[in-house]
Image (cartoon, rainbow, N blue to C red):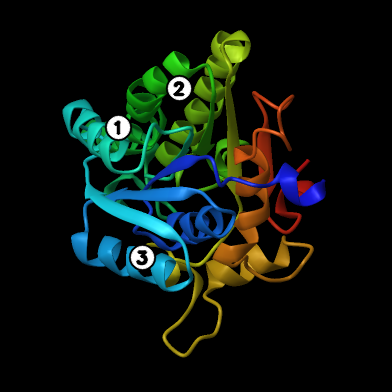
Amino acid sequence: MSKELFDLSNDVAVVIGGTGVLGGGMADALAAAGAKVAILGRSEERGAARVKAIEEAGGTAMFHSADALDSDSLTAARDAINSQLGPVSILVSAAGGNRPDATLPPGSNFCELPKDAWNGVFDLNLVGGALLPAQVFGETMLEQGRGSIINIASMAGMIPLSRVVAYSAAKAAVLNLTQFLAREWATKGVRVNAISPGFFPAEQNKALLFNEDGSYTERGGQIIGHTPMERFGSAEELSGAVIWLAAHKASSFVTGQNIVVDGGFISTTI
């Protein structure tokens, strides 16, 4: 019975941002649980590598180039996935990130934060990271009366971390949209939840956390000092949360929730 709870063999899953470290790890986990997985992203090279790894592990996967900020691009991807793998029943929206000009170094002036930088971070994380994917793929799920949408938010959306003000605010908006959609679609067979990772080293934040010799930067050391587990997370440690939320039997009464995977970091701030 427990194995059946997490069986995704009748599902088609889309992972937007599946070419990245965290999104790719979640794509691997979904495929291992039996889902047919479509990787969406802008890097064909990394997408093809992820598909190859999944197929070599015995899974089924495809890559489709897509821009999460372009609804026409997402619609074209959806139609291709439907034709090749079948209708999508699981959506993981893992597109997102920050940009240097939207970050406030120590001593900088918030009043001088460029509006274009703010808008860019909001577009990437809210519009491309949750809104448009939910509209495009949610439409199919509503027609089927069955689906699970998992938005990748951030612990930064729950507390206003220093320096990354635009990113924190955008991820807070993702959490709010997640709850709105959960309420709107609760009686229509579509569940909407979020996962908020803590600090997971990846390409975009590696220099922030580590020195070239592998030691912690000042910022990295501060984070470790506030993390009860005294380490950063690894991509595979998001697998359990994403499979649980994706599995229609295991989490059939779960919607509008935010699952925090952060080694206890949030517990030191409340």
Residue 71 rendering spot, x and y as whole percentages = 22, 27
- For the residues marked 1 and 3, what is the alpha-carbon distance in whole angstroms? 26 Å
**Kind of residue indicated by mark 2:** Met
Residue 17 rendering spot, x and y as whole percentages = 36, 50
Which residue lies at the image location 50% right of the left edge and 67% below the top edge? 201
Task: Say if mark 1 contacts mark 3, CB within 8 Å.
Answer: no
Q: Nearer the viewer, residue 232 or 64?
A: 64
Residue 204 rendering spot, x and y as whole percentages = 37, 62
Res. 254 image quadrant: top right
Res. 253 image quadrant: top right
In the figure, is residue 208 to the left or right of 190?
left
In the figure, is residue 101 to the left or right of 163?
left
Q: Which residue is mark 3?
A: 50
In the figure, is residue 52 to the left or right of 173?
left
Pointer 1: residues within 10 angstroms few (<14), some, or many (20+)? some
- Number of marks in the rendered image: 3
**Kind of residue indicated by mark 3:** Arg
Secondary structure beneath dot 2 equals helix
Which residue lies at the image location 69% right of the left edge and 46% below the top edge? 6
In the figure, is residue 6 to the left or right of 120?
right
Give the farthest residue toward the bottom.
213
- For the residues marked 1 and 2, what is the alpha-carbon distance in whole angstroms? 24 Å
Image height check: is 250 above or below 191? Answer: below
Pointer 3: residues within 10 angstroms few (<14), some, or many (20+)? many
Residue 124 rendering spot, x and y as whole percentages = 31, 38
Q: Which residue is mark 2?
A: 141
Residue 159 seen in the figure: no
**Kind of residue indicated by mark 1:** Asp
Determine which of the numbered discs, if any, sits on residue 123 in the image: 1
